[in-house]
Amino acid sequence: MAKITVREAISQALWEEMEADPKVFIIGEEVGVWGGTYAVTKGFYDHFGPKRVKDTPIAEAAIVGGAIGAALTGLRPVAELMTINFAFSAMEHIVNEAAKLHYMFNGQFVLPLVIRTVGGGGRQLGATHSQTPDAIFAHFPGLKVVAPGSAADAKGLLKAAIRSDDPVMFIEHATLYQLRGEVPEGDYLIPIGKSVIQRPGKHVTIVTYSKMLDISQKAADQLAADGVEAEIVDLRTLRPLDMEPILESVKKTNRVVIVEEGWKSFGVGAEVASRIYEEAFDDLDAPIQRVAQLEVPLPYNQNLEQLALPKPEWVVRAVHEVL
Amino acid sequence: MEKQDYLELYRQMVVIRRLEEKSAELYQQGKIGGFLHLYIGQEAVSTGLISTRRPEDRVITAYRDHGVAINCGIPAREVMAELLGKATGVAGGRGGSMHMADVNRNFWGGHAIVGAHLPIAAGLAIGDQYQETGGVTICMFGDGATNIGYFHEAINLSKVWHLPVLWVCENNLYGMGTAVNRASAVSSIQQKARGFGIPHSKVDGMDLIKVREAAQNAIDLVRGGNGPYFLEISTYRFRGHSMGDPERYRKPDEVQKWQENDPICIYGEYLVNTSMASRDELNEIETQAEEEIKEAVEFAEQSPEPAPDSLFDHIYVE
Ligand SMILES: Cc1ncc(C[n+]2csc(CCOP(=O)(O)OP(=O)(O)O)c2C)c(N)n1
Ligand SMILES: [Mg+2]
């Protein structure tokens, strides 16, 4: 199997789906002539042309709203929001339109729509450009939210998202594009709404996703050196949330640490922890620990910014708390 | 303006140019992080524009803000310290390149979400109108920003409420890699003001004297209680959108053609031709500017990092 980067994996998924289905097209800022600000769509404009790779004005509401409208006519748009921080400029259309139209009109409206976007901190971009607000989008029934943490998942999940008839928010991470992993060639799909055990272990369950999968793997390596075997469950999809592998794992380990990059308050960890308390309280031998970004808008200064972001040591410490 | 004032504007432009060149270097050395958007080529725009403001006039702009900061009177060393993320920076190292501000100098930022500061500018003008300060808000933004809804909401409101705001579009022909005619229904951005009944004009932004004249005329109108005014200033950024721009969207000879129209040279020529300054005087200013930037870098490099325990400062007032 070929080892490729997350960037290449996403690019491959897009390319293959566009080749396979003429109804798939890309719409967003700098996706065409520029080749994508993260170079994901490099070469697409020359190959597929301006009809299928649409450079838009800076107009997030029109990007998402326009993609919704096109999807309603049977097309399968992949809308790109340059970063998730700009998704707030399209919030009306994500939350009040994309997440509602199918239900509100009694199933008549169908929106086979993907919104690809990029989140994450740690690049000294300052408070407005460094957010990981994934949990916000997972709040709304009607929207599916996917956030892969490996190259294979990025490819498989994006292909599934493009073929899904529901609106899917596909959240990439800005510091994961260079991460390499083995990715099956050709038609490789991973179903949306399936968590998975990425690393088996028996002493503690670490629940995580996206970039924090990498951080958790590093923590698990450190823990392994001390004889602690951590089992890592990767959510991959935030909504619908698949608790099965988590509950299975907790039955075995009886201890849980949840690791997310976003803020702890009202976050992914809060949701997962509540579900575990509701559904598997008796399996727990210790209170659940959460690792998350400190509750501060991220500053530009590198030292300060790094102080606020979760790192493997925090995960290791949290694991020792629950052991 | 007196001779000294004319020379001061030359000084500001040269300081901006040297500051930006130095920043590019420091970015390449990894001493500046994040995104860095240079103002090289556009110096005459904000220098001419802001030379017409009174202390009570507010200035607000987008993320291409280092030059604007200098024109607002922020010392180069504080700008440089911010770029290096130091505690002595104009935003204490928290904001970085895109988020500079100095309220004491009536400079209200440095905003990195395209177009988002336009409604805020309208709000600053609401404040001045409400409190009868006589101040005008000068709001600068790019051509690309005129395509987002925020722009249309803000300028409409400014007209409906007759707000004292001077809208200034720096049309440098591109928003990132997207040429104006690929993104805007009209290539003449000032036309957009017409639809809202806002008086407007357009001026050559490579010529500081022309910018100053147009800005003076505009700001006088706004101050005179005539409601908002819209000024389109045509200009060009000589460098990429930000560091690391592959610049696939424009040809080198287009860039070169504009570079031959260097705003600093044009203004220098003007000063010499009108006998306002000799070549020697201009050279002297250039030497001083270089010194100033050198000193600014030293200051920034020697300045302390923000204290770790300051991380949680200023999340709330209370
Ligand atoms: C709402 C939003 N969308 C996208 C971006 C990314 N972005 C940053 S600058 C820029 C181009 C802006 O162009 P223009 O307004 O012409 O200003 P210029 O860079 O030319 O000075 C884009 C798309 C952003 N910061 N905010
Ligand atoms: Mg522009």
Image (tube, helix red, strand yellow):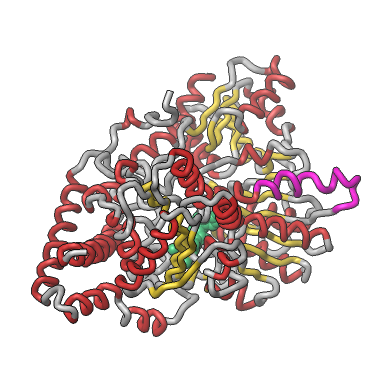
Classify residue A201 as left or right of residue A69.
left
| Quarter-of-image position of residue A207 | top right
Classify residue B139 as left or right of residue A256.
left
Q: Quick one: quadrant of the N terminus of chain A? A: bottom right
Q: Foreground residue, A195 or B217?
A: B217
- Does the magenta segment cover residue B69? no
> For the magenta stretch, what is the residue range?
A91-109
- Name the residue located 37 percent from the left edge and 70 percent from the top edge: B239
| Quarter-of-image position of residue B25 | bottom left
Count of numbered circles in the view = 0
Classify residue B175 as left or right of residue B69.
right
- Name the residue located 51 percent from the left edge and 52 percent from the top edge: B118
Per the picture, the main secondary structure of the magenta-coloured stretch is: helix
- Name the residue located 70 percent from the left edge and 25 percent from the top edge: A275
| Quarter-of-image position of residue A80 | bottom right
Above-or-below relation of A215 to B308: below
User: Percent from the top left, x then y, of residue A58?
Assistant: 57, 61
- Does the magenta segment cover residue A105? yes
Look at the image and tell me whether residue A248 can be seen: yes
User: Percent from the top left, x then y, of residue A296?
Assistant: 45, 33
Q: Foreground residue, A294 or B228?
A: B228
Look at the image and tell me whether residue B62 can be seen: no
Above-or-below relation of B275 to A164: below
User: Percent from the top left, x then y, of residue B176?
Assistant: 49, 66
Q: Foreground residue, A300 or B56?
A: B56
- Name the residue located 76 percent from the left edge and 69 percent from the top edge: A20
User: Percent from the top left, x then y, of residue B310?
Assistant: 33, 30
